[in-house]
């Protein structure tokens, strides 16, 4: 691991201001960043530890929603009584991720910003435009079973690995930040992740030094909420495909899919097809997909997972 400086921030504004320095990264649970530093995939010159900041509460908002502090641990978020009652989709997605020990450390902001699990990204002997811009993409001509079927580019077809983000996308979450100049902004999760295009190393709209302080959930939308994750083994594995669904009595609803793109994949036009069933939804959702021979199966798997979730939603109601 490369040597780095370390400091603890006293306030969110101080953390963001200190992160103005080039080569600075925030560290929260460290469950992703430290692994990447050990492999020298990430080599920050300076770390700002945000764990001491008072960003670890879940508060009711004036409009009846919830504001989740950036440092709320995944375990605490999944166990929160209001989340379990009003946003069960989120609790289910969180519990489908990682392991108990990891969830005890992992934070809300860190989870959103965890990096891809593309095997070429982790193998520093291989070309990877995301790790080393301009070096090429090992996955495009190589092994791409786990990678994106839609939204990618000829420079990168990595997927975003978070389960939590898929549920938050279905729930229309909004990311709240503070920038190094002290200004604040609110970014809908729908606009948070960037398509890889020709610069896959840039993954979100966050500016250098911009600190996530919270994630806001709008008021509860009700409906039957389900999260189904399909993976190579029953636990401790990332999704091949996951489906977050909110299904209402009248057949309306929301669907977001994980494991298929650089971000949780949701298209409102596909949701309009819900009364017609999974085939119609999947056709709209994956219109324009560009799968590889290795991962074409994900399109069928996603359609079948959506079908299974819709059946489950009806069974529970019956
Ligand atoms: C073996 C293993 C299995 C896993 N399985 C799953 C799984 O099945 N599903 C899943 O969803 N996840 C899984 N994970 C990933 C895990 O959920 C993430 O590592 C974790 O959520 C990251 O949170 P953290 O707080 O530890 O982030 P850190 O590692 O501390 O940080 C991650 C990134 O976020 C940045 N950051 C942190 N906080 C802030 C902030 N407030 N503002 C701006 N930037 C910030 C850091 O600079 C860094 O770039 C797995 C991880 C491991 C190691
Ligand atoms: S898909 Fe993206 S992360 Fe994977 S090797 Fe290609 S450029 Fe790197």
Image (cartoon, helix red, strand yellow):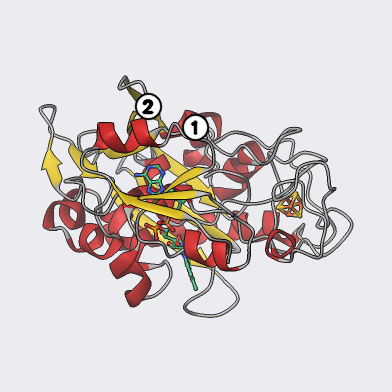
**Residue 296 horizontal/vertical position (percent):** 77, 57
The image quadrant where one finds the N terminus is bottom right
Q: Earlier in the sequence, mark 1 or mark 2?
A: 2
Relative side of 281 to 63, left or right: right
Q: Is residue 131 above or below residue 214?
A: below
Q: CA distance from mark 1 to mark 2?
A: 8 Å
Question: Is label 2 in a helix, a strand or a loop?
Answer: loop
- Say what secondary structure mark 1 lies in: loop
Instruction: Answer few, some or many: residues within 10 Å of disc 1's Cα (few below 14, many 20 plus, some between 14 and 19).
Output: some
- What percent of the width, then of the height, locates residue 190? 47, 32
Q: Quadrant of residue 265?
A: top right
Above or below, 208 against 148 in this view is above
Q: Are marks 1 and 2 in contact (CB under 8 Å)?
A: yes
Q: How many marks?
A: 2
Report which residue position mark 1 lands on: 208
Q: Identify the disc placed on residue 180.
A: 2
Judged left or right of residue 60, residue 285 is right
Who is closer to the viewer here, 166 or 74?
74
| Residue 49 spot, x, y in % from top left | 33, 52
Whether residue 274 is visible to the viewer of this picture, yes or no, is yes
């Amino acid at each position: 691991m490369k040597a780095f400086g370390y400091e603890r921030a006293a306030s969110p504004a101080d953390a963001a201001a200190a992160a103005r320095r080039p080569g600075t990264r925030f560290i929260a649970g460290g469950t992703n960043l430290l692994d990447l530093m050990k492999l020298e995939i990430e080599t920050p010159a300076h770390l700002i530890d945000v764990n001491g900041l008072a960003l670890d509460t879940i508060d009711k908002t004036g409009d009846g929603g919830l504001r989740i502090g950036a440092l709320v641990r995944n375990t605490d978020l999944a166990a929160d009584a209001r989340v379990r009652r009003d946003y069960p989709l989120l609790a289910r997605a969180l519990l489908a991720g990682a392991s108990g020990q990891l969830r005890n450390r992992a934070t809300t902001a860190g989870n959103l910003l965890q990096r891809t699990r593309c095997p070429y990204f982790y193998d520093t002997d291989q070309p990877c435009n995301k790790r080393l811009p301009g070096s090429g993409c090992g996955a495009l001509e190589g092994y791409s079973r786990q990678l994106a079927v839609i939204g990618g580019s000829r420079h990168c077809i990595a997927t975003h690995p978070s389960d939590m983000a898929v549920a938050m996308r279905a729930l229309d979450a909004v990311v709240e930040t503070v920038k190094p100049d002290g200004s604040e902004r609110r970014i809908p999760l729908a606009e948070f992740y960037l398509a890889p295009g020709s610069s896959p190393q840039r993954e979100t709209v966050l500016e250098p030094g911009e600190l996530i302080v919270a994630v806001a959930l709008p008021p509860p939308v009700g409906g039957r909420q389900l999260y189904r994750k399909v993976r190579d083994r029953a636990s401790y594995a990332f999704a091949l495909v996951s489906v977050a669904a909110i299904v209402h009595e009248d057949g309306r609803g929301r669907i977001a899919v994980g494991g298929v793109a650089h971000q949780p994949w949701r298209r409102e036009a596909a949701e309009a097809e819900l009364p017609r069933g999974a085939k119609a939804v999947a056709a709209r959702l994956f219109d324009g997909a560009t799968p590889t021979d290795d991962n074409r199966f994900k399109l069928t798997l996603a359609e079948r997972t959506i079908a299974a979730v819709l059946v489950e939603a009806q069974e529970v109601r019956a």
